[in-house]
Image (cartoon, rainbow, N blue to C red):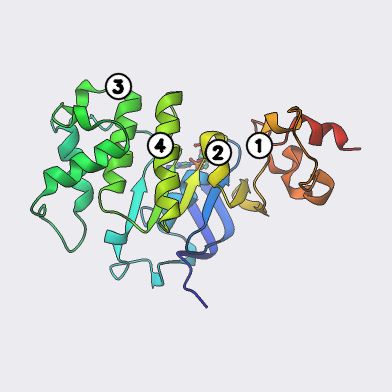
Amino acid sequence: MTTPAIDARGVHVHLGASHVLRGVDLRVEPGEVVALLGANGSGKSTLVRTVVGVLEPSRGEVNLLGHRLGNDVPWQRIGYVPQRISAAAGVPSTASEVVASGLLHGRRLSLPRGWRTLAREALDQVGLADRAGDAIGQLSGGQQQRVLIARALVRRPELLVLDEPVAGVDRPSQEAFAATMTRLVDDGLTVLVVLHELGELADLITRAVVLRHGQVVHDGAPPRPHASHDAAEHEHLHPHTSELPALDARHVGLSDGPLDAGDREARP
Ligand SMILES: Nc1ncnc2c1ncn2[C@@H]1O[C@H](COP(=O)(O)OP(=O)(O)OP(=O)(O)O)[C@@H](O)[C@H]1O
């Protein structure tokens, strides 16, 4: 049996007075690309922040790459892209330096030889190699987001956890990101990604986990893209809502309606 990349069991998280996660189980096997979906406030960011050790569960346990959360986790094998923040906030660094900070981890506190080359390669993966020497504050919000993705990729992770990585990123850059992800997934990368819509990543997603009010309400097939039903060549081979009751938008509370129109109309 393989060791799961992520194994979270019975996770409860309290933030202030709120009981945000209420007994979440999440298992991600090596090579899977799992989308974490749910309405605003359902607990997606809280779950990924707990998975990467930023937040501590009040109950339950999390294992990453076979290690209980803590110092034993091989962090150098894990990349994390937080929800969009300003990478520029008070940081006088260049894009290249921000990316290189992704090479640091618990056991490596100074940059390795050749870090500039590694940083440039990672920036190239997000289409920003020509901006390597620019101050991060001179980049747009979407470009800063791409720098954060490069910072996660620079350590060549085997597990990548991303929180809405393409929010605010333009369509061509989303396509470039999807192409990079496809290449990395082909090479065996395991991914947990918070998304509001599957978008350009739809073809990559192997499983969807949907949260509602801090609980998992669906764990299985990803929702189908909207357009597919209307296309002339569309074949009705996939399971419809009657076979996937938990993917009913009313049950999962997805504000952006993951089901295509045909599925919704087919429902009694
Ligand atoms: N520091 C905090 N203190 C108290 N409550 C918090 C805190 N951070 C988040 N929450 C609450 O926890 C709940 C889940 O928040 P979370 O950010 O995990 O949701 P989300 O599913 O990622 O939402 P979104 O789609 O808007 O990013 C929300 O109700 C939020 O108000």
Q: Nearer the viewer, mark 3 or mark 4?
A: 4
Asked if marks 4 and 2 touch (Cβ < 8 Å), the reply is no
Which numbered circle lies on residue 41? Answer: 2
Q: Of the two numbered discs 4 and 1 on the same chain, state the one appearing first in sequence.
A: 4
Which residue is at a point 80% across and 36% down the rendered structure image? 263
Using the numbered discs, state the Cα–Cα distance from disc 4 to disc 2 in whole angstroms. 26 Å
Q: Amino acid at mark 1?
A: Leu
Image x and y of residue 86, in percent: 30, 30
Which residue is at a point 19% across and 43% down the rendered structure image? 119
Towards the viewer: 80 or 231: 231
Residue density around tag 1, few if under 14, some if 14–19, many if 20 or more, within 10 Å: many
Relative to 28, say whether 266 is above or below: above
Which residue is at a point 28% across and 35% down the rendered structure image? 147
Q: Of the two numbered discs 4 and 2 on the same chain, state the one appearing first in sequence.
A: 2
Q: Of the two numbered discs 3 and 2 on the same chain, state the one appearing first in sequence.
A: 2
Q: Of the two numbered discs 2 and 1 on the same chain, state the one appearing first in sequence.
A: 2
Using the numbered discs, state the Cα–Cα distance from disc 2 to disc 1 in whole angstroms. 11 Å
SS class, disc 4: helix
SS class, disc 3: loop
Residue density around tag 3, few if under 14, some if 14–19, many if 20 or more, within 10 Å: some
Residue density around tag 2, few if under 14, some if 14–19, many if 20 or more, within 10 Å: few
In the visual, does 125 lie left or right of 7? left
Question: Which residue is the site of mark 1?
Answer: 254
Asked if marks 4 and 1 touch (Cβ < 8 Å), the reply is no
Q: Is residue 43 visible?
A: no
Among all residues in the image, which is located at the extreme bottom? 1
Using the numbered discs, state the Cα–Cα distance from disc 4 to disc 1 in whole angstroms. 24 Å
Question: Which residue is the site of mark 4?
Answer: 177
The quarter of the rendered structure image containing the C terminus is top right
Q: Is residue 65 visible?
A: yes
Image x and y of residue 187, in percent: 40, 56
Image x and y of residue 49, in percent: 41, 50
